[in-house]
Amino acid sequence: MSAKAKPVSAIPRRAALYLRVSTGRQAENDLSIPDQRRQLQSYCQAKGISIEAEFVEPGASATDDRRLEFQRMMDAASQKPAPFDAIVVHSFSRFFRDQFQLEFYVRRLAKSGIRLTSITQDLGDDPMSVMMRQIMALFDEYQSKENAKHTLRAMKENARQGYWNGSRPPYGYKIVASEQRGARMKKKIEPDPDQTENVRLMFRLALVGNEHGPMGGRQIANFLNSRGIRTQTGGRWGVGAVHQVLSRTTYIGLHRFNVYSWRKKLEKPDDEIVEVAVPPIIGADEFEAVQEMMRSRSPQFKAPRFVSAGTLLGGVCFCAECGGAMTLRTSGKGAQYRYYTCCTTARQGKTGCKGRTVPMDELNDLVVSYLEDRLLAPERIEILLTGLLRRREERVERQRARITELRKQAADAEGKLTRLYEAIENGLAQPDDQNLKGRIAELMRIRDSARADADRADGREKEPDARISPEALSRFADAARERLRSKDGSFRRHHLQMLVQRIEVGDDEIRIKGSKTKLLQTLVASGGVSGGNSATNGVRSFVPNWLREQDSNLRPFD
């Protein structure tokens, strides 16, 4: 005990009771709290101790001090003078299951003249009693870790069998009863019809988008919020919530359990993660395409200076010899001549890389011509558009089934409301009954929500009829070719860089690498099946704007 600590009374007269159970289920079923209270009250009555306060912790772990009632009790103990002389617990494990933390708080209480008393482990203050308390705390800590290990092992096995361990399911899923085992009901998750179409909508907006092209996380969140689509808890969508949906493998039928340690703030190794098969909502190809798109948008893969560069191939053109970027070099009066040059050679000379220099216009024309000849051929475009139209038809069919289900849900709620109103008119129910009012409000909410969702889905379902014909393919190719040949730089640069992921320039060949998914998105955005608008909002862009007000960086004069 510290030299500044107050003397702890051997016979306390005023006490605070601290009661705790480990899980919320125990607290809900009153398995332990009432019994602890009864034993603590009997102990205090037998000892002639008055009970000044009671702190009840329902469903909190004793492995750390992140407990609301515990902290409130410690704040009260720190008052001067303290409102009680002792804290009485059933056992030291109710107070802490960590030996170091237990001793820390025992000494902290001792400085205020407060004693920690266990009615089942009654010890004194002599060195032998202190040693016994520390040994008991070590056993409690060991037991807690063993229990956690066995519990996690049981939960992992439960997940391997395809059952849900608890917590809120991912957006788009709901918990359903699966199998009765003894007194316990095993549960699984399955797609929630009220949310699955919203999940498909988010992936569709990320991959294809609307008339302006693919959307980012913020645009998708704004799109959902503006149409009244809410999260699972009724809140508004944000970038983080959208990203969590778009990056979660659960939607392709592979839910991962025990991925993250919230206590250590670290992701667990792969051998501790359990993969659970669940009904999918999104196709694997569509999911992978969205993941690739999100990775390509990351600033870690392409800096803003390349995305907004004035050169057509800036950021995607590299030297085949050393892998260094091909950057802009100029010569002549007023930078009349422009070239792509290996940056390694420019910095280190021929010792770094023998390098190569290519006229900018020449390389630009070679790349654009190749893309036109290989990617805008009628047979290739027909294959791409056929797949697009097939997926759109499947989406329309799902949308129609969804609208039918929503209309039925709204009609059922309307029918129940009508019957309740008839019961009130016939005197079978009282209009001032609070339960009846709550039921009517709930049915009205279900009816109005289903109608609103059906109206929104009905508006999305009415898409123009699109058929593939030689004339349509020709118009499509001409529109895409015209945009790729545009000299204004905006559409041409952004969309060519979406098509082309990497260009390697060698002595006798130019190797172009790209993605079929990116090709489909860009061509559809550029030409459209029926001549749509460009996807200028769907590409990465970093355009700096001046602040409206003056700041430390002086603004230029107009």
Image (cartoon, grey):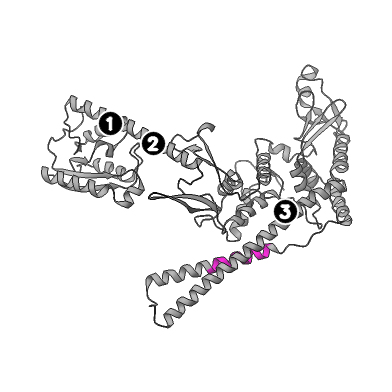
Identify the element where label 3 is drawn. Answer: helix
Q: Which residue is mark 3?
A: 391
**In this picture, is 507 found above or below 278?**
above
Instruction: Tell me which numbered mark, 1 or 2, is placed earlier along the sequence.
Output: 1
What residue is drawn where x is 70% and y is 52%?
A: 209
- Please give the range of residues in magenta: 447-460
Is the N terminus in the top left, top right, bottom left or bottom right quadrant?
Answer: top left
Where residue 282 appears, x then y in whole percent? 63, 49
What residue is drawn where x is 85% and y is 37%?
A: 367
**Res. 112 mark:** none
Residue located farthest toward the bottom when viewing the structure as drawn: 426
Q: Which residue is mark 1?
A: 137
Residue located farthest toward the top when viewing the structure as drawn: 351
Task: State the image quarter where residue 432 is shown.
Answer: bottom left
**In this picture, is 520 found above or below 400?**
above
Mark 3 Cα-neighbour bin, 10 Å: few <14, some 14–19, many ≥20: few
Identify the element where label 1 is drawn. Answer: helix
For the stretch drawn in magenta, the main secondary structure is helix
Q: Which residue is mark 2?
A: 148
Q: Amino acid at mark 1?
A: Ala
Q: Amino acid at mark 3?
A: Arg
Q: Amino acid at mark 2?
A: Ala
Asked whether the beta carbons under mark 1 and mark 2 sit within 8 Å of each other, the answer is no
Residue 407 appears in view: yes
Residue 486 appears in view: no
User: What distance separates the C-alpha of mark 3 from that of mark 1?
Assistant: 62 Å
Instruction: Tell me which numbered mark, 3 or 1, is placed earlier along the sequence.
Output: 1
- Residue 451 located within the stretch drawn in magenta: yes
Asked whether the beta carbons under mark 3 and mark 1 sit within 8 Å of each other, the answer is no
